[in-house]
Amino acid sequence: MITTLHNNILFTFNDESDSQGFNNVSAGGIVYKSFDHDAKTPRWATVLVVGPDVKDVKAGDEILIENLRWSEGHEIDGLKIWMTQESEVMCVREQTTE
């Protein structure tokens, strides 16, 4: 189990990138590269863990993070995770169980 401290948020990006662009998946499941999007724009991510001081975000939420306001990615148990602080989150899209 991974925990984080203070107002930190651990997350995975919803779109992964490499030196050739961003990997996107269409509604039909087709993976394609996007070259018109770069790391200098805000990005959507899915929250894995929040610190005890985080007030408005919870695990499972999708968040839009201010551009370049995240840590370097680290792979843990085969999953690439990143970290940001709650103050860098621009908006939250809560997951609903309908």
Image: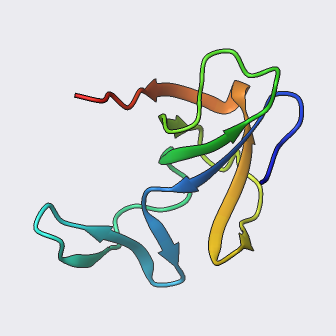
Which residue is drawn at the image coordinates 25% and 78% (left, top)? 31
Across and down, in percent, residue 20 comes to 45, 84
Across and down, in percent, residue 64 comes to 49, 37
Looking at this view, name the residue that lies furthest to the left: 28
Answer above or below: position of 42 versus 50.
below
Identify which residue, 41 or 8, lies in the foreground. Answer: 8
Across and down, in percent, residue 12 comes to 57, 56
Identify the image quadrant of the N terminus.
Answer: bottom right
Q: Position of 8 compared to 45: left or right?
A: right
Identify the image quadrant of the C terminus.
Answer: top left
Tell me where residue 87 sits by quadrant.
top right
Tell me where residue 32 sits by quadrant.
bottom left
Identify which residue, 26 or 19, lies in the foreground. Answer: 26
Which residue is drawn at the image coordinates 14% and 61% (left, top)? 27
Looking at this view, name the residue that lies furthest to the front: 1
Which residue is drawn at the image coordinates 64% and 69% (left, top)? 80
Which residue is drawn at the image coordinates 42% and 62% (left, top)? 15
Identify which residue, 27 or 2, lies in the foreground. Answer: 2
Across and down, in percent, residue 42 comes to 51, 44
Say how many tags the image has: 0
Identify which residue, 97 or 91, lies in the foreground. Answer: 97
Looking at this view, name the residue that lies furthest to the right: 5
Answer above or below: position of 80 versus 1.
below
Q: Position of 38 compared to 78: left or right?
A: left
Q: Position of 41 compared to 98: left or right?
A: right
Looking at this view, name the residue that lies furthest to the bottom: 20
Q: Position of 45 compared to 69: left or right?
A: left
Tell me where residue 50 sits by quadrant.
top right
